[in-house]
């Protein structure tokens, strides 16, 4: 006799009624939930709340990133069409969802402090540091709450594993209470183990995919902010070279010296 036949014979319950083949999967799922103990139900509630929270984060981030990308493209087009920084500064707030606006304001404000918006900036390194500061602040804001996705993706599987272990413990407890190795004795514990394992995977996989996709989008925004900062600095330097420098004022004629006696 094969091992599979032995296992089926070992767990067979002669007293249990035959389950009709036409039973639906929904009915089996509800029956597993009904047979689950308080530990399994607690694990499922925790996983449900974690799933709702992770999906709320992902949807909000995707909407925010989509708006930032659209406004960023409009802002770059307006910047390249305009010939003066003062014109862009006047309308930059219209593209506020884009992180490029913060980079522009930081560089423009530093340029105004250094030279009043005219000529070559005396300290170009300060402009670069201003651009880096604006980029860092924007990235920090964009990455907010994303660590929760990583936490949920890593912890959901372990929470489901906890429910699995407790379900197996209940299964062995059922074996000891029944005094016989029957399918009816082990079915409730096995169902708890299976449903919590599946729930942990259902929660963890979307959170992991969402975290990886959003992290890739953040890296794209970081690269765009760096490119725009360099483009803005080049525009400032080119404008300073084209702007004619006012000739120095001629020296005042010296008054004739009068000798005093």
Image (cartoon, rainbow, N blue to C red):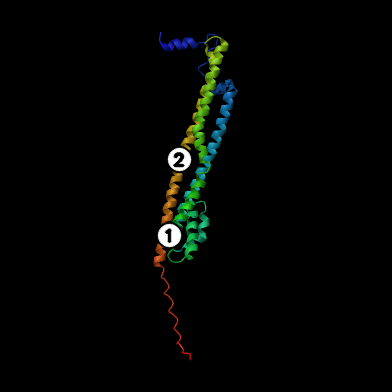
State which quadrant residue 228 falls in: bottom left
Residue marked by disc 2? 213
Q: Earlier in the sequence, mark 1 or mark 2?
A: 1
Q: Position of residue 151 (x, y in %)?
A: 51, 35
Residue for point 49% across, 46% down: 65
Q: Which numbered tag is attached to residue 71?
A: none
Gap between marks 1 and 2 measured at Cα: 35 Å
- Vertically, is 201 above or below 174? below
Q: Is 35 or 258 nearer to us in this picture?
A: 258
Marks 1,2: beta carbons within 8 A: no
Position of the N terminus, as image quadrant, is top left
Residue 157 pos. (x, y %)? 50, 29
User: Does residue 207 sit above or below 74 in this rendering?
Assistant: above
Residue neighbourhood size for the residue with mark 1, other residues' Cα within 10 Å, grouped as few (<14), some (14–19), many (≥20): some
Q: Name the residue at the right extreme.
A: 38
Q: Where's residue 169, x and y in %?
A: 54, 18
Q: Horizontal and vertical percent for residue 32?
A: 55, 21
Nearer to us of marks 1 and 2 is 1
Residue at the front extreme of this rendering? 261
Question: Visible in this render: residue 50?
Answer: yes
Identify the secondary structure beneath mark 2: helix
Is residue 173 depicted above or below 66 in this figure? above
Instruction: Name the residue: 58% across, 29% down.
Output: 45
Question: Is residue 71 among what the camera can see?
Answer: no
User: Secondary structure under badge 1?
Assistant: helix
255 to 184, vertically: above or below: below
Task: Give the numbered dot on residue 124.
Answer: 1
- Observer-nearest of 172 and 6: 172
Mark 2 Cα-neighbour bin, 10 Å: few <14, some 14–19, many ≥20:
few
Quarter occupied by residue 175: top right
């Amino acid at each position: 006799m094969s091992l599979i036949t032995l296992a089926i014979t070992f767990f067979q319950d002669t007293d249990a009624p035959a389950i009709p083949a036409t039973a639906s999967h929904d009915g089996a799922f509800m029956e597993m939930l009904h047979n689950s103990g308080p530990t399994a139900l607690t694990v499922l509630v925790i996983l449900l709340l974690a799933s709702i929270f992770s999906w709320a984060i992902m949807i909000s981030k995707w909407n925010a990133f989509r708006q930032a990308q659209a406004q960023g493209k409009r802002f770059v087009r307006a910047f390249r069409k305009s010939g003066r920084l003062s014109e862009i500064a006047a309308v930059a707030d219209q593209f506020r969802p884009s992180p490029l606006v913060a980079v522009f304001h930081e560089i423009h404000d530093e340029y105004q402090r250094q030279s009043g918006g005219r000529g070559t900036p005396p300290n170009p390194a300060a402009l670069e540091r201003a651009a880096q500061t604006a980029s860092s602040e924007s990235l920090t804001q964009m990455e907010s709450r994303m660590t929760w996705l990583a936490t949920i993706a890593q912890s959901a599987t372990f929470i489901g594993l906890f429910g699995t272990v407790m379900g197996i413990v209940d299964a062995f407890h059922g074996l000891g209470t029944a005094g016989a190795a029957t399918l009816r004795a082990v079915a409730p514990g096995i169902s708890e183990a299976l449903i919590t394992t599946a729930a942990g995977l259902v929660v963890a996989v979307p959170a992991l995919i969402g975290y990886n996709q959003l992290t890739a989008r953040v890296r794209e925004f970081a690269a765009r902010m760096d490119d725009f900062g360099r483009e803005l600095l080049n525009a400032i330097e080119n404008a300073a070279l084209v702007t004619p420098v006012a000739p120095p004022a001629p020296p005042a004629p010296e008054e004739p010296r009068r000798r005093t006696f």
